[in-house]
Amino acid sequence: MRSNGSTRITDSFPTDAELLSRARSGDHAAFRLLVNRYEPIVASTVQGMLGRGSEAEDVGQETFIRFYHALDSFREDSTLKTYLTRIAINLSLNELKRRKKKQVRFTGIETLEERDFATSGNRVIDENERKHLVRKAIDRLDPKHKAVVVLRMLNGYSTKETADLLNLPQGTVLSRLSRGMKSLEQLLKPYIANDEKTGTTSATSFAL
């Protein structure tokens, strides 16, 4: 049972297990350290799925709220990074379902708005524009493909780790990744065709 008090964290770099033990005893400072430690990972996952904005912020906060309420039941049979990423992905997928109900669903794979790929001759698109185009393209992916692309290509998880996070067979992860990258290739095709100067020839090299 948790108390309302907290103790000073004196260790230079306490382990997750030590912080979890203290947080379960009501040490708010320990829980805050865990939040600070994993906030970048959660933010990267949520923003990869939802983009930047209030919805992503809400999902990020909800991830840690759920983690707090699950402190006593977390069995530590997976790493805390995996546990929090799984919560963030599931909440993000739920948010995408809510979005889908509010929006007109596009069928098939469409190219991005012409203005997103507006170019002037052989103008080289800078890094900020590149990130914007990738973000717009990822937003158009089917949620099940998007989850795999975000985890594998943006967050750097292995195929096995991605399979564990999504509770899928590795073969399904590989299939969804392939389909997701092919969709990105088609969505980014207008830029790729105009970006020969940089040597970019695929969505993979462009996105990374």
Image (tube, rainbow, N blue to C red):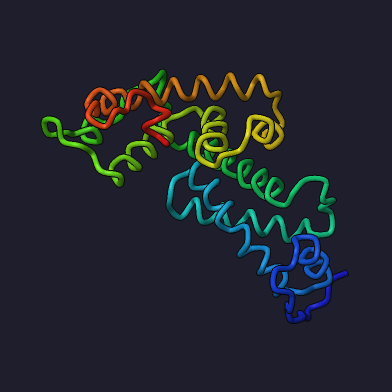
Image check: 197 left or right of 200?
A: left
- Seen from the viewer's position, the closer of residues 60 and 19 is 19
- Seen from the viewer's position, the closer of residues 91 and 16 is 16
Work out whether 124 lies above or below 180. below
Work out whether 120 lies above or below 81. above
Please state, as top left, top right, bottom left or bottom right, where the C terminus lies in the image. top left
Image check: 167 left or right of 61?
A: right
How many numbered discs, if any? 0
- Seen from the viewer's position, the closer of residues 93 and 185 is 185
Image check: 133 left or right of 78?
A: left
Q: Position of residue 126 (x, y in %)?
A: 25, 43
Please state, as top left, top right, bottom left or bottom right, where the N terminus lies in the image. bottom right
Q: Position of residue 42 (x, y in %)?
A: 58, 52
Q: Position of residue 194 (x, y in %)?
A: 22, 26
Seen at 67% across and 34% down, the residue is 166
Seen at 63% across and 34% down, the residue is 158
Q: Residue 109: which quarter of the image?
A: top left
Q: Residue 136: which quarter of the image?
A: top left
Seen at 70% across and 68% down, the residue is 13
Residue at the left extreme, as displayed:
121
